[in-house]
Amino acid sequence: EDKVVQSPLSLVVHEGDTVTLNCSYEVTNFRSLLWYKQEKKAPTFLFMLTSSGIEKKSGRLSSILDKKELFSILNITATQTGDSAVYLCAVQGAQKLVFGQGTRLTINP
Amino acid sequence: NAGVTQTPKFQVLKTGQSMTLQCAQDMNHNSMYWYRQDPGMGLRLIYYSASEGTTDKGEVPNGYNVSRLNKREFSLRLESAAPSQTSVYFCASSVTGQSLYEQYFGPGTRLTVT
C-alpha cells in the first residue's frame, strides 16, 4: 500500500531560525513529489519535484528529492511568522496523489 | 478566474440526514477529486474523476457517492450522514493528458454530523 510519512509532525521555532521538514515515501509507479502549504483553508502549491538531486528554490524555501533513498526535504531559511502553517507532502503514483499527515510549523516572534 | 469553488462553506447535519457538497472549477481541468481532512490524518482521497463521465473510488469511499455532472462540476453526496463523517472536505482539480500535474484546491467545506 502506498505510504507517505512526514516528520516531525509538529515544530516550534523562533523567527529567524532555519527549519528542515522531512518526507519519506513508498509509492508504486512514482511520478512526482509535491509540497503544499496549508494555512487556514485550502492547500496552496509550493513545489513539484521529479528528478533526484535537483534543488527547487523559491525565495527562502527550497526542496530537494532523493529518489534512491525515497525522501524529500523542505528547507525554510530565515523563518518569519507568516511561514506558520501546515506543510503537506504528497506523492503522485499511477493516478492519484497520496498525502502525508503534514508538519505543523509554528514560528514564534 | 475563480479557480475551484465549493458550497456550502459550513454545514451541520443530524445523523441519518443526507446532503450534497458542490464543487465547480473554471480552469478547464479534466480531473477532479474529493478529499477529506481529519486532524493528524492528512488528506485522504474519497473519490476522483479522471475525466468527464468517469468516476473511481479512492482510499475512503464508503458512505459517499459522487456525480461528475459535466466537465466543470463534481458533487459529493452523503446519503445517510454519520458522526464519523465529521470532517473538512476539499475538492480539487488538475489537468490530465500530461504526465505531471499539480492539483488546485477549493476552500473546503467544514461538516459536522451530530
Image (cartoon, rainbow, N blue to C red):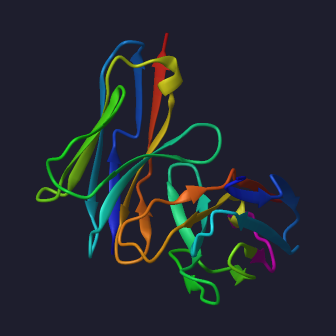
Residue B73 x/y as whole percent: 73, 73
Identity of the residue drawn at 37% across and 12% down: A16
Identity of the residue drawn at 83% across and 57% down: B8
- Which of the two residues, A7 or B26, is positioned nearer the viewer here? B26
Q: Is residue B82 magenta?
A: yes
Q: Is residue B85 above or below residue A29?
A: above
Q: Give, as a single range, the part of the protein colored magenta.
A: B77-84
Q: Is A12 on the left or on the right of B22, as rendered?
A: left
Q: Is B28 on the left or on the right of B99, as rendered?
A: right
Residue B25 x/y as whole percent: 69, 64
Residue located farthest toward the bottom when viewing the structure as drawn: B53
Residue located farthest toward the top when viewing the structure as drawn: A109
Identity of the residue drawn at 70% across and 65% down: B85
**Quadrant occupied by the C terminus of chain B:** bottom right
Residue A69 x/y as whole percent: 13, 56
- Which of the two residues, A104 or B103, is positioned nearer the viewer here? B103
Q: Is B17 on the left or on the right of B48, as rendered?
A: right
Q: Is residue B100 magenta?
A: no
Residue located farthest toward the left when viewing the structure as drawn: A68
- Which of the two residues, A5 or B27, is positioned nearer the viewer here? B27
Place residue A46 in its image quadrant. Answer: top left
Identity of the residue drawn at 71% across and 72% down: B72
Residue A21 x/y as whole percent: 32, 37
